[in-house]
Image (spheres, helix red, strand yellow):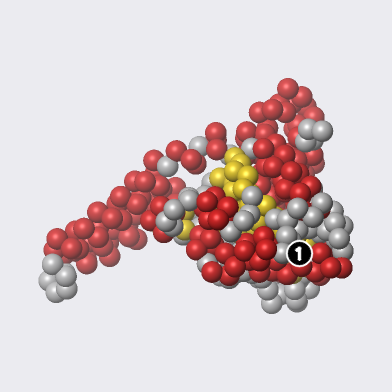
Amino acid sequence: MPPDLWQLYSLMFKCRRFEEAVAKLWHDGLISGEMHLGTGEEAIVAGVVSLLQEGDALALDHRGTAALLVRGVDPVLLVRELLGYPEGLCGGRGGHMHLFSQPHLAVSSGIVGASGPAATGFGLAAQYQNPGAVAVAFFGEGAMNQGMLLESLNLAAVWQLPVIFVCKNDGWAITSTDGSMTAGDLNERARGLGVPVIEIDGRDVSDVWQAAQTALERARSGQGPTFLHARCVHFEAHFLGFQLLRMVRHPLREMPRVAVPLTHAILKKDGEPFRIRLAGLRKVLAAVWRTVRDPRRGLAHDPLWRTRRLLRADLSRLQAMENDLTREVDHIIASALVGVPS
């Protein structure tokens, strides 16, 4: 049976609007610290999490907000947690990187690769206590360089655990390209540990849904883990306020903040030789230029835009659904902010 694109798009759209609202709260100064959003990952999240059943477990990385939203966690509690309020999901002590919901068997961690051991533990428990249940781990491609994640893949394969390892590969490890950080092929790493691989287009929700369904059927029937390798784009880069994106989006405001200290450093009499300082300037300018010219940030790589094109034949239904979901998210934010000082 093919996926229900209307349902999947509604989940994706709600996630996008929710995270856009969270971004505004962050820019308004109501959320402190770093904020890692999953904008660009919506097809991966909706395609996988929408297939989970009661008793399935979810182990997330530091971009777990959207997955918890799709899983059914109270969104008002989520927002209040991000705000650091004691009425939040984790008493205001977890923030956005350490979100937990015991009723949903959902955990997250800011430690890179930690979702692997968590999901493997969930999978082992399911194998003994709840046959037919599965565990899903979400992580970025940089986590594949962490020993605990590779150990988790190995254990899940040896014990034939019902675990789905979902690698969200956006090609960047914070400010470094994956090619400069990771040797070899990630799919071959997983296969070398005995885990079957399905490579998918993480911008195509149908592709993700079909691959996830295959992997879940294998896991539920006792055939062990699967490695889903999904390519995607992070439209807000590694975190909100990423310096290179700020310079690209607001050059007149942001460039002087960088250009002035760099100019002082280059013209300073003491320190490194001029050629070394000039080379550093070239690196900064090259990074800005790469960000400006990055073709992946176009609409063609936006999972929402790609799915919306398939549904716009019924434009009135589409717009009505989007308007309803926008109002729902606005109500969530307003409810969460009741009692918050302005």
Looking at the image, is 28 positioned above or below residue 310? below
**Pick the front one: 207 or 26:** 207
Number of numbered discs on residues: 1
Q: Nearer the viewer, residue 88 or 231?
A: 231
What residue is shown at x 54% (from left), y 69% (from top)? 147
Q: Residue at x 31, y 56 (%)?
A: 284
290 with respect to 279 (left or right):
right
- Amino acid at the residue labelled 1: Gly
SS assignment at label 1: helix
Expressed as whole percent of the image width and height from the top left, the position of residue 39 reads 60, 50
Residue 250 visible? The answer is no
Q: Is residue 307 above or below residue 241?
A: above
Q: Residues within 10 Å of mark 1 (few under 14, many from 20)?
A: many
Rendered-image quadrant of the C terminus: bottom right
Kindly identify the residue that appears in the image at 62 percent across and 48 percent down. 197
Hey, which quadrant is residue 164 in on the image?
Answer: bottom right
Above or below, 1 relative to 110: above
Is 29 placed left or right of 4 in the picture? left
Point out residue 186 in the picture as x, y percentages from the top left corner. 52, 53
Mark 1 highlights which residue?
Answer: 123
The image shows residue 144 at horizontal and vertical percentages of 53, 60
Q: Is residue 118 visible?
A: yes
Q: Quadrant of the N terminus?
A: top right
x%, y% of residue 336? 76, 63
Left or right placement of residue 118 versus residue 338 in this view: left
Left or right placement of residue 319 versus residue 192 in this view: right
